[in-house]
Image (spheres, grey):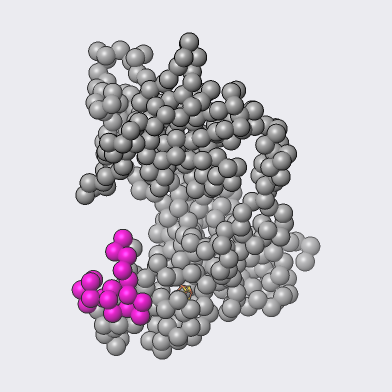
Amino acid sequence: MGKKVIVLGGGNTAMDCCRSSLRLGANDVKVIVRSPFTDMKASEWEIEDAMEENIPIIENHVPKKFLHKKGKLIGMEFEKVKASYDKKGKRSLIPTGEDPVIVKCDDVIIAIGQYNAYQWIEKDIGIEFGEWDMPVVDKKTFQSTHEKVFFGGDAAWGPENIIWAVAHGHQAAISIDKLCEGKDLHSRPDPMTNLVSQKMGVHEWSYDNDISQKKRFLVPHADQKISLKNLKVEVELGYDEKLAFEEAQRCLNCDVQTVFAESKCIECDACVDICPTDTINFVYNDSEDKLREKLRVPAANKNQDLLVSEELPTKRVMVKDEDLCVHCGLCAERCPTAAWDMQTFLYEEARTYSKCTTMDIKKTNLIMHKIKAENEFVIKFANVNGSGSASANQMFAKGVFRIGIPVSPKNIFPSNIQGFPTWFEVRVTEKGYLGRREGIDISVAMNPQSYAEDIAEIRKGGYLLYDSSW
Ligand code: SF4
Ligand code: SF4
């Protein structure tokens, strides 16, 4: 590695290359990008770390020429540009007309990603290629113009991240399964979603709802005097226990939703008073624009839909702007009628083998044949508060959901007094949280104190699991 190094590119790889160059002996490393700094593809924290090591990032410079003398690289020539964006946000880089910029260097690292190269695909087998020599791919089915060939990830539409590639793989798998079964590829299965109540007591939730105003805690780094001299020294030291805890406290629990039940609301406005961010409004309905204006905090972000309830007895509606909600749960704690509940949103990607949603439960001996519809039953756990039951209950409910069956779980006894009995009921139903079913089909009694009561509740033909040593 020479002493003067130019790294071309503005992605995460470029940030790796420039920092590694310093560690491999270079002492003058520059990152030079075509785009404006703000358009760089690298993650914000990767750019911060490179700049922390005093690596300059030069924006708006388009590489034009390698310069060499007697067969040796001596520098590069760049053209200065400025970015211009059309109405759709498409960027053009316009030369400024200034003199070319010469940057001396010993080495150039080209970290600008790679092209797809499809020379290996014979041109007469039915796969059509379009712009940039990329395959023509259906955005919904991931099928190419050859019905048996599918593309995804970078191979389909150019550079994306690995998460997109995995998602494309799931979708292509669904298409391939449909193709093999002779079905319409455009008729896609929906993903599965569910809401799980987090209520554990009158004022307690199974998630941590403390709101922290702190900014992101930076991961501590090794001393640069050491880390810049040795490629093998781990730069990021990681959080210690205290910092990790503080960083976790910043979580906004955006998977936990405020769920509103119109039928329970008595319009006392207590939730409006308690909400620390003025998120909740009871107003007369109107056109969307007017409604947005008359909220306690006008909702300017039109990309964020408003939650508007059904009309309430006073002819008003409850309107909530999700942009403001910090998921503190105060509305649900304050509400005298439990019209608000805090519920975790669960999402399960659509699968190729949807038939398995009934299979796994059918196989368990618990259900046997007495319950007619295998995925329509209620299981109730009789627990003791403070025994770890809340976590176990939630894990059970989520476990069932993860194998592909919607569930509707809730705590029955809103007590959080340690040692007191408590119950957790899980309705396993294809209707998910919309399902309603009275009576218990399976009772798992873990509390001898309420054992007799638990038996009495079981539906005829149901089951009781208990510790026979009681
Ligand atoms: S969860 Fe907190 S911030 Fe969100 S609506 Fe309820 S009280 Fe307001
Ligand atoms: S506190 Fe409950 S009952 Fe009162 S207005 Fe809010 S949601 Fe309705």
* Dominant SS in magenta: loop
Q: Position of residue 29 (x, y in %)?
A: 55, 33
Residue 432: image quadrant is bottom left
Would residue 444 be visible to someone looking at this image?
A: no
Point 43% across, 67% down: residue: 436
Rendered position, 19 above or below 269: above
- Relative to 64, is 42 on the left or the right? right
Q: Is residue 57 above or below residue 325?
A: above
Residue 5 vs 38, above or below: the answer is above
Q: Check residue 288 for magenta coloring.
A: yes
Quadrant in the picture for the C terminus: bottom right
The residue at the point 48 percent across, 10 percent down is: 70
Q: What stretch is highlighted in magenta?
A: 286-303
Percent x, y of residue 293: 27, 76
If the image is split into quadrants, where does the N terminus sit? top right
Closer-to-camera residue (389/367) = 389
Answer with left or right where residue 234 lies relative to residue 292: right
In this rendered view, identify the residue nearer to me: 434 or 244. 244
250 part of magenta stretch: no
Quarter assignment of residue 320 = bottom left
Q: Where is residue 316 in the image (x, y as percent from the top left)?
A: 29, 83
Can I make out residue 122 in this image? Answer: yes
- Residue at (26% x, 23% y) in the render: 129
